[in-house]
Each structure stands twice: as C-alpha cells, then as structure tokens.
Image (cartoon, grey):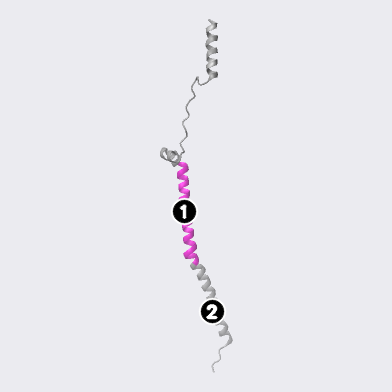
Amino acid sequence: THIIPQNSILSRIMESSSYELNASVSSLEFLSLFLFRPLLAVVFVFSLLILGWFLAWKLVLVHVPLVQEIFGLRKKTVKPKPENRGRFTQIYNNMDSQSSASQW
C-alpha cells in the first residue's frame, strides 16, 4: 500500500483554500473591472459635462439676447416717468406759474 504523508494532505487543503481565496479576489477584480470602473468613468464624464454647461451658462449664454428671450431673462426696459404725470405736479406747476406771474 501507498501511504500519503500528512503534510502532503495539509498542503493540498491549503492550496484549495488559497485557490478559493484567489477566486474570490478575482471575482472582486472582475466586479471592479466591469462594473465600478465604467460606472465611475460615466459619472466623471457627466460631471465634466454638467460643470462645462454650468460655466457656459453663467459666463456666456445668459448674455445672448436670443437665450434671454427664450428663457425670459430679458429685463424689462424702464421707461422714464413723464414730468407732469399726476395731480400734485399740476398743482405745484400752477402755483409756480401764479407766483412767478404775481412777482412781475
């Protein structure tokens, strides 16, 4: 009969457990390689696009008249108020004209 030494059996058990450990590490590497890295790459690209769009909007696009008109960003033009627009201005103008006429 052939007798297998004890340390040979132990070494085979150790090899199989290290193989399982290597298999689990390789599955993590596989998951990292095919899931996490592409996901991080897509997130990175989208963050660059969003940052670029934000900077373009704040620095350039808000000053373009067509964009202002489309998004309602154009400020309303302020019309100057007329000189004699109300009752009080008419009253004071009449008082001024009467006082200047009475002085002569």
Residue interval drawn in magenta: 31-59
Label 2 neighbourhood size at 10 Å, few (<14), some (14-19), many (20+)?
few
Label 1 neighbourhood size at 10 Å, few (<14), some (14-19), many (20+)?
few
Determine the residue positioned at 45% across, 47% down. 53
Where does the image place residue 37, in percent across and percent down from the top left? 48, 61
Relative side of 10 to 55, left or right: right
Out of 19 and 68, give the one closest to the viewer: 68
Where does the image place residue 40, in percent across and percent down from the top left? 49, 59
CA distance separating discs 1 and 2: 44 Å
Instruction: State the predominant SS element of the stretch in magenta.
Output: helix
In the image, is residue 56 above or below residue 95? below
Relative side of 61 to 90, left or right: left
Where does the image place residue 64, in percent across and percent down from the top left? 42, 39
Q: Which residue is mark 2?
A: 16
Q: Examine the image and state in which quarter residue 69 appears.
A: top left
* In this view, the mark in front (1 or 2): 1
Out of 14 and 40, give the one closest to the viewer: 40
Relative side of 33 to 9, left or right: left
**Residue lying farthest to the front in this orientation:** 87
Reply yes or no: does residue 37 show up in magenta.
yes
Where does the image place residue 18, in percent across and percent down from the top left? 54, 76
**Residue lying farthest to the left in this orientation:** 66
Q: Which residue is mark 1?
A: 46
The secondary element bearing badge 1 is classed as helix
Label 2 amino acid?
Answer: Ser
Determine the residue positioned at 47% across, 46% down. 54
The secondary element bearing badge 2 is classed as helix
Determine the residue positioned at 50% across, 65% down. 32
**Labels in figure, total:** 2
Whether residue 10 is visible, yes or no, is yes
